[in-house]
Image (spheres, rainbow, N blue to C red):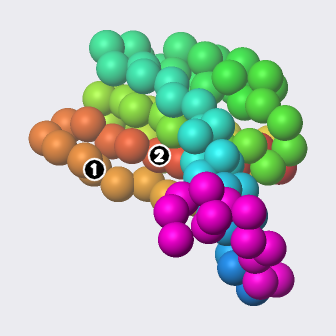
Amino acid sequence: MDDRDRDERPERDGRAALREAVRGAAGERALMETLDLRGLLCPLTWARTKYALSLLRRGGELLVIVDHRPAVPDLKRNAEETGNEVVSSRESSDGVWEMVLRKG
């Protein structure tokens, strides 16, 4: 049986559903926006983050990268106060933090 025969076979419901879920998950991750704010200080970090979030649809995710330590708690607080969710926050390397925000 070659690939042409395999493509013509009807898929079982379980495999088709799994394949669709994987495609959906991959598509959502590919749509995450990245905002690199290294080199910027507060309050510009929040101003740019707020603008980037305004461009996303509800539930969209934004990866924010900063290297200004005081910006980290400010970004978290401001994001939550404006109805957004902090999905994750971690120091990725010396002095660089990555934060994933989800638009609420």
Q: Amino acid at mark 1?
A: Glu
Q: Can I make out residue 48 in this image?
A: yes
Q: Is residue 3 magenta?
A: yes
Q: Which residue occupies 42% across, 20% down?
A: 37
* Count of number-bearing discs: 2
Q: Can I make out residue 76 in this image?
A: no
Q: Which residue occupies 13% across, 41% down?
A: 94
Q: Which residue occupies 33% across, 42% down?
A: 97
Q: Which residue occupies 79% across, 49% down?
A: 59
Q: Label 2: how many residues lie within 10 Å, few (<14), some (14-19) or many (20+)?
A: many
Residue lying at the far left of the rendered structure: 94
From the viewer's perspective, is residue 48 above or below residue 56? above
Q: Earlier in the sequence, mark 2 or mark 1?
A: 1
Q: Which mark is residue 91?
A: 1
Q: Nearer the viewer, residue 57 or 5?
A: 5
Q: CA distance from mark 2 to mark 1?
A: 9 Å
Q: Label 1: how many residues lie within 10 Å, few (<14), some (14-19) or many (20+)?
A: some
Q: Which residue is mark 2?
A: 99
From the viewer's perspective, is residue 85 above or below residue 78? below
Q: Left or right of 42: which side holds 19?
A: right
How far from the left and from the top, in percent, is residue 60? 74, 43
Q: Nearer the viewer, residue 68 or 20?
A: 20
Q: Nearer the viewer, residue 57 or 66?
A: 57
Q: Which residues are magenta?
A: 1-13
How far from the left and from the top, in percent, is residue 27? 66, 46
